[in-house]
Amino acid sequence: MDKNTNEMSFLDHLEELRWHLIRSCLAIVILASAAFIAKDFIFDTIIFGPKKIDFPTYKWFCHLSETFGQGDSFCISEMPFRIQSRTVAGQFSAHLWTSILAGFIVAFPYVIFEFWKFVSPGLHENERKNARGFIFISSLLFFIGVLFGYYVVTPLSINFLGNYTVSGEVFNDFDLSSYIGLLRASVLASGLIFELPIIIYFLTKVGIVTPMFLRKNRKFALVIVLSLSAIITPPDIVSQIIVSIPLLILYEVSIFISKFTHRRIEKEMRKPSSTQ
């Protein structure tokens, strides 16, 4: 079996990849169908949750401001905007694409599993053993990022943009696709950003990144993190700091992972010379 695997041609690899993609897409479609059926829960509870003043994040910020003697400066009494659909197929389209997004998020561990099954035959036995926790760790980081995007980035953005106005003559009527697009971008961007330690691990494995490089460019990483935080959050310093802190922690964790991986690579490279 291993012999046949080693002798697979380029077209055989493409065929193998095709079946991994088919199984991944099938899993996403099945879970998306379940999300499509659970429309009321998906939209009323999850999608429109950050629009409600009793959303957990708003309660937490209110409690935080009272704890630090700021009174009710961070408390929210209303969301002065409405969500509307201005196209004939607007609501159905939002329902369909939101279901697909939910299917992808829930199926992410299986998608990673299929990806791992495709690349693992090309790895050495010790590399496969060292990366056994790849699926669990990458899925955990992705879900933490999704939750961070949903409970931190999204409500901060919605609260700021929903209350922002250039004139009392203008009332905020947000289109359904725009609202969902903001939520989708916040959640997916955060989920992918939290995969940074995994990306650094593989970049270190192939020799593109070293811990020395990451330490040397820490100040540039700080600028990038602050810029990224300014892009995905409202333009106020508090929101940017809240988002920047976990990103900086991720960067420091990535340095540690790169250092650990780099040491293992050097140790493996010294083994042949030591045996001689």
Image: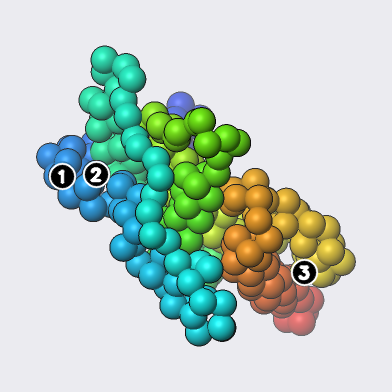
Do the CB atoms of the residues marked 1 and 2 lie less than 8 Å apart?
Answer: yes
Q: Nearer the viewer, residue 141 or 129?
A: 141
- The kind of residue on which mark 1 rests is Asp
Secondary structure at badge 3 equals helix
Distance from label 3 to label 2 (Cα)?
44 Å
As measured in the structure, the alpha-carbon distance from the residue carrying label 1 to the one carrying label 2 is 5 Å
Answer yes or no: is residue 127 visible.
Answer: yes
Residue closest to the eye, 197 or 47: 47
At label 2, the amino acid type is Phe
Mark sitting earlier along the chain (1/3) = 1
In percent of the image, x 63 and y 64: which residue is there?
Answer: 238
Seen in the picture, residue 106 relative to 213 is either above or below; the reply is: above
Q: Residues within 10 Å of mark 3 (few under 14, many from 20)?
A: many
Q: Residue 224 location in percent, x, y?
A: 75, 54
Q: To which residue does mark 2 refer?
A: 43
Please tell me how crowded label 1 is: few (under 14), some (14-19), or many (20+) other residues with Cα within 10 Å. few
Q: Quadrant of the C terminus?
A: bottom right
**Rendered position, 256 above or below 120:** below
* The disc label shown at residue 211, or none: 3
Q: Residue furthest top?
A: 88
Residue at image point 73% right, 51% down: 227
Helix, strand or loop for disc 1: helix
187, above or below 89, in the image: below
Which of pointers 3 and 2 indicates the residue nearer the eye?
Answer: 2
Instruction: Pinpoint residue 133: horizontal percent, then vertical percent.
Output: 44, 69
Relative to 206, 87 lies left or right: left
- Asked if residue 250 shows in the view, the reply is no
* Image position, residue 75 (x, y; %): 45, 67
| 196 horizontally vs 39: left or right | right
The residues bearing labels 1 and 3 have C-alpha atoms spaced at a distance of: 48 Å
Direction from residue 235 to residue 51 in the image, left or right: left
